[in-house]
Amino acid sequence: MNIEELVNQNYERFSESDRAVWQYITAHRIECEDLAIGAMAKKCCVSRTAVMRFAQKLGFHGFAELKVYLKMDNQKTEVPNQIDQVCNTYYHVADSMRHKNCDKIFETMDRAQRLFICGEGMVQTSIKREFKRIFMSAGRIIFDVPSGQELINLLPIMTNNDLCILISVSGENEKMLQMARQLRVRGTPLLSITKNRENTLAHLCDYQLYVEAGNLVETPIHWQYESTTSYFILIDILFLKYIEFQDRKERLDAVGDIDSATV
């Protein structure tokens, strides 16, 4: 898990001082690898204690451990060509999803009376279509939320008994952010799928899934191409984890029934 994921998971607990520290780290990642806690506090205009509390909110024992983690996170592997780089991106998405505990997402999904999915644009439409198709094979029907006025009309019917999946490549689409803010007020659980980087949508959601940001490739006709396969890898592994989750639940229920029968 990289530092952005740790921040997104704990962002709701952040104070103004925490946000000031994080903003400075975001803008000066390499420099922060070697800063002492006093120097960091001075640059962020906060106390040494505030810097220490920020590190502890992310799960570290102290600022020194945070710096070690940041240095490891900053290290990037050089790849010789675009094909290797794209393959490396696929590997990181698959490996991240393989080790991610998604049980809370699945528990919320199973409790939800209805599942909604929303995203604007051609890429997002393809992702939504695949998400709906693959989960339908497990008996989960997902309602596609259209954009524009229809989206606004649907907001009042969504409740805290639903789950809404929000897809945004950048995590900064203004319509998606407005929708997330309104649904948060209504208490509707939210799951975001975005690029693996600092973004506003992830901060607004209860659960976050990420893909690695790939490099843009210029085509012979001077268009910019970015592979979207990472999203489909993410959805595929998420679905397989969901099937495993359901199998575990059935086995536990069966054990519970046996225990009840022997009492």
Image: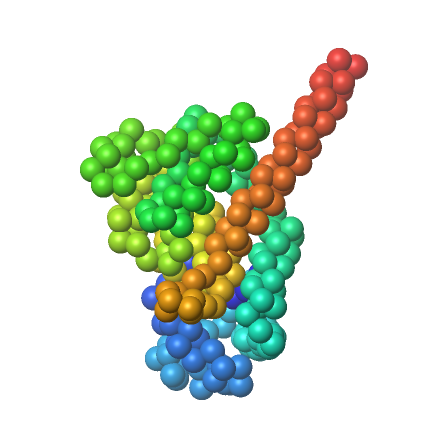
- Examine the rendering and report whether any part of residue 21 can be seen: no
Residue 170 lies, in percent from the top left, at: 38, 58
Residue 22 lies in quadrant: bottom left
- State the residue at coordinates (26%, 37%): 151
Q: Is residue 169 above or below residue 81?
A: above
Residue 15 lies, in percent from the top left, at: 37, 63
Outermost residue, left direction? 149
- State the residue at coordinates (39%, 84%): 42
- Examine the rendering and report whether any part of residue 147 can be seen: yes
Question: What quarter of the picture does the N terminus occupy?
Answer: bottom right
Left or right position of 86 against 53:
right
Q: Nearer the viewer, residue 167 or 250?
A: 167
Left or right position of 93 against 165:
right
- State the residue at coordinates (74%, 24%): 255
Residue 155 lies, in percent from the top left, at: 27, 35
Q: Nearer the viewer, residue 193 or 220?
A: 220
Way the structure is coloured: rainbow
Question: What quarter of the picture does the C terminus occupy?
Answer: top right
